[in-house]
Amino acid sequence: MLRVCFLLLLGSSLCTAMCDLPLSLWCSSGETAKSCGVHEQCRQAMRKAPDAPPVNLTLYFESLCPDCKNFFATQLYDTWEALGTDVLNLTLVPYGNARETKDGDKWKFECQHGDQECIGNLIETCAINILKDIKVYFPFINCIEGKSGMPEKDAEECASQQQIDLNPIITCANGPMGNALEHQMALQTDALNPPHKYVPWVTLNGVHTEKLERKAEEDLLNLICDTYKGPTPQKCLQRFSKSKRCYQD
């Protein structure tokens, strides 16, 4: 019955009662397909193809969250470096559990780990916008996330190491451009469905479930490889250590 439902893409209650996600998302990852009881059907319907699109992974985080830093260090950067942009399309959203209020013609941000975290969020947001190429800005942000937690000082050190001009990034972070860009990060975070309850918060091909989150925190590499519909890279056999989360206050 499940095979018939899947292949014909019927939306009847008989089919969809097996899974609480929309039918179109049942094959969004191997874990989701297993949860919906259609893993074999998805595997057959989406055989590995050399021209498969990359897996879309979005990370919602905040710059000074210890568990976000751990996720960068133990899962995210190694996975991205191992698989490359042909397999993993990564989007970073530095905002997390912050809150924003309108203050005249600007936005005022209150961050879970204090003012320094807001500064870090702004620097990383501006780096994404100004550097544009993820092959440049992700190593820079990863470097910042791996340091002491004084964002401007850390950014100076990382920019020097990676030969990045920090001046336009700091100018952005301290001015209206950074304020407007961070507001966009807030809007993107607040639009999550379901709403985020903690960070790091991961969506995979637009989907978030607790099972997907747990798998991402425990073994992101194999989660991406299981989801990717192209030839499986050799690096998929590796294992990385577990991560944690920063819950909202």
Image: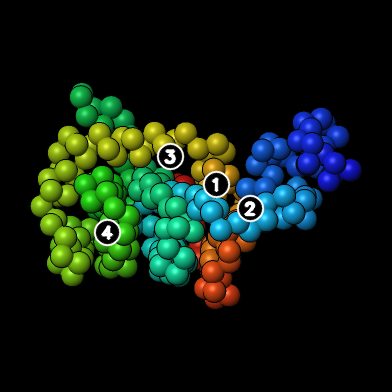
Q: What residue did someone put label 2 on?
A: 29
Cα distance, mark 3 to mark 1?
A: 16 Å
Residue 24 falls in image quadrant: top right
For label 1, the SS is loop
Quick check: 50 left or right of 62? right
Q: Amino acid at mark 2?
A: Ser
Describe residue 162's horizontal placement relative to residue 109 as left or right: left
Label 3: which secondary element = helix
Amino acid residing under circle 3: Thr
Precedes in sequence: disc 3 or disc 1 = 3
- Other-residue count near label 4 (Cα within 10 Å), few / some / many at <14 / 14–19 / ≥20: some
Tag 1–tag 4 contact (CB < 8 Å): no
First along the sequence among labels 3 and 4 = 4
Label 2 close to label 4 by CB (< 8 Å): no
Residue at 83% x, 46% y is 3
Label 2: element kind:
loop
Type of amino acid at the residue the image marks with label 1: Asn
Q: Identify the amino acid type marked 4.
A: Val
In the picture, the disc for residue 136 is 4
The residue wearing badge 1 is 205
Between circles 3 and 4, the one closer to the viewer is 4
Q: Residue at x 41, y 49 (%)?
A: 91
- Tell me which colouring the rendered structure shows: rainbow
Q: How many marks?
A: 4
Disc marking residue 189:
3
Name the element at disc 4: helix
Give the image location of residue 94, x and y in percent. Answer: 35, 48
Contact between marks 2 and 1 (CB within 8 A): the answer is yes
Q: Can residue 35 be spotted in the picture?
A: no
Q: Can I make out residue 163 in this image? A: yes
Q: Nearer the viewer, residue 219 or 29?
A: 29
